[in-house]
Image (cartoon, grey):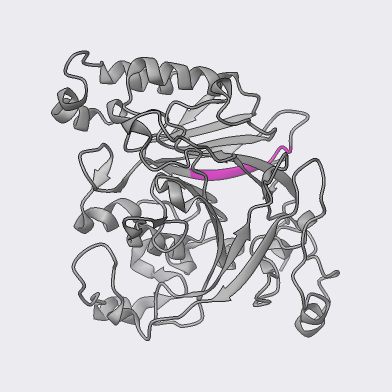
Amino acid sequence: MTSPERKRTRRTRFVCISDTHNASPATGAFKLPRGDILIHAGDLTNQGTLSELQRTVDWIEQSDFEAKIVIAGNHDITLDSAFYFQHGLVFHNQHPQNSDECIRRLRDSPSITYLNHESKELKLTRPDGPRTSFKVFGSPYSPARGLWAFSYLPDEASLWWEKIPSDTDVVITHTPPRLHCDESRDRGAAGCEMLRRSLWHIRPQLAICGHVHEGRGVQRVQWDLTSPNVRYREIGTGYWTDPGAGKKQSYVDLSMRGGEPINGQTGLKNAVNDMQLDNGIEPRWGPSSQSKEEAHKSCSSPMNTTDRSGVGKSVFSWTTTQQPEAASTLYDGIGPERPLEMTGAESATHVQGGSLSSGQGNLELPTGRRRRRETCVINAAIMASSWPHKGSGGKSYNKPIVVDIDLPMWE
C-alpha cells in the first residue's frame, strides 16, 4: 500500500501578545518584532469603549503581519453583547456604548481575523512568506470572577471547552489552563482545569493565553498517553528562561532549526519525533532509519538555539510531574473539592487521548495528529501590573513573545 504524500514544513513565526489594556507600540509600552502572524489573546482595552477599540484596531491593522488573529477578554465588555445589555450601565452610565458597533469594528476589519469561540483555517499566501497553513480556535471566555464579560461558572466549564475541534493546531484563549502560566499572587493557580483537560485531549502545538498578568511566560507540557484508563496525566513540564534582557527578544524556538522541536526529542528524551516523520522531514538526529537507542545517545543533552537576529537563546529546564493514581480521584480545581466521576461507558471505551464518544478521542484524529504528545503554553500578557484599570500609577510592561514553529506548507 502506498503511503500518503508527506507534507513539507516550513518555519513560521508567531508574535504573541495579550492584555495590552490600551497600551500600544505608539504609546511606547512595547515594540512589535517582525513575524508572520500576530496573536492578541484578549483584553485589548480597559472597558471596551468604541474609542478604546478604535485606537487598538488602528494600530493592529497598521502592523506588518500577514495574519492578525484577535480574541476579546473579560475587560472588553462591549464585545459581549449579552453581558453589556444587562450590565453596561454599571460601567458606562454617563456614555453608554453601542455594542453592535463595537463588534462590527473588529468583524469588519479587512486585515484582522476576529474569533469569538470559533475556529478558522488559515493559509499564508504571500510569495515572500512561509506559505504554511494551520487551524486555529479562539475564545474570549474565562472563569467568572467579579462582574466582567465573557465569563462562565465552574459547572459550565466543560460545556465551553469540549467545543474545541479535535484537529486544532493553535488554541487561543483568554484564560490560561490550570497549573500552566496561571500563577496569581492573590489566587494561586487561577487557570481553568477543564481547559487543561481539553488541551490533553486535543494536544495542539500552541496554546496562547493571557488574563493572569503574573503568569506571563512559556511552558512546554508533555502529555502522558500511556495509560488506557487514566486521563489528564502529564509526564513533565519544560520551564522557559526568558532571553529578553536588554535589546534581545523574548524568544521561543520550537522549530527543527532550533534543535528541540515541538513534539520532538526534548530535555526529557521521551519519544522519537514521529510527527515530523509524518510531515516528511527528518528528525534532528539524522535519517529515519536510526534506532531509538542511537537517537537517545545522540541527543542525550538539551540543545539551545543559536543566537541570531537579536533573538537570544531559547532555553527550557525540565521537571517531571507528580501524577494522581487514577482519574476517578482527580480534583477538578474549579469548585468544591469532590471526586470526579467516570462512567462505565467512558472507562470501557477510553483510548489514548479520550473517550470515543467525546469527539476528541485519538481514533478520530488524523494519523499525524495521533502522535502529538506536547503542547507549548504561552501566556503573552503585555501588562505586567495586576490592575491596570484602577489608575495609571505603577504600570509596567512585558515584551511580546516570539515563537518559531514548523507548520505544514499548503502547496
In the picture shown, does residue 133 fall above or below 320?
A: above
Q: Residue furthest right?
A: 286
Q: Quadrant of the N terminus?
A: bottom right
The one of 248 and 230 positioned closer to us in this rendering: 248
Q: Residue furthest front?
A: 393
* Boundaries of the magenta span: 130-136
Quadrant of the rendered image containing residue 134: top right
Q: Quadrant of the C terminus?
A: top right
Quarter of the rendering containing residue 2: bottom right
Q: Is residue 109 visible?
A: no
Q: Residue at x 59, y 18 (%)?
A: 62
Q: Is residue 131 magenta?
A: yes
At which x and y percent is residue 273? 70, 69
Q: Is residue 278 above or below residue 210?
A: below
Residue 174: x and y, percent? 40, 44
Name the residue: 85% across, 70% down: 287
State left or right for residue 6 relative to residue 230. right
Residue in view at x 35 percent, y 84 percent: 326
One can see residue 177 in this view: yes
Where does residue 182 sit, x and y in percent of width and height? 42, 56
How many marks are shown on the rendered structure?
0
- Residue 79 placement: quadrant: top left
In reply to whether residue 20 is colored magenta, the answer given is no
Residue nearest the viewer, comparing 105 with 310: 310
Q: Is residue 101 left or right of residue 11?
A: left
Q: Position of residue 190 (x, y in %)?
A: 34, 56
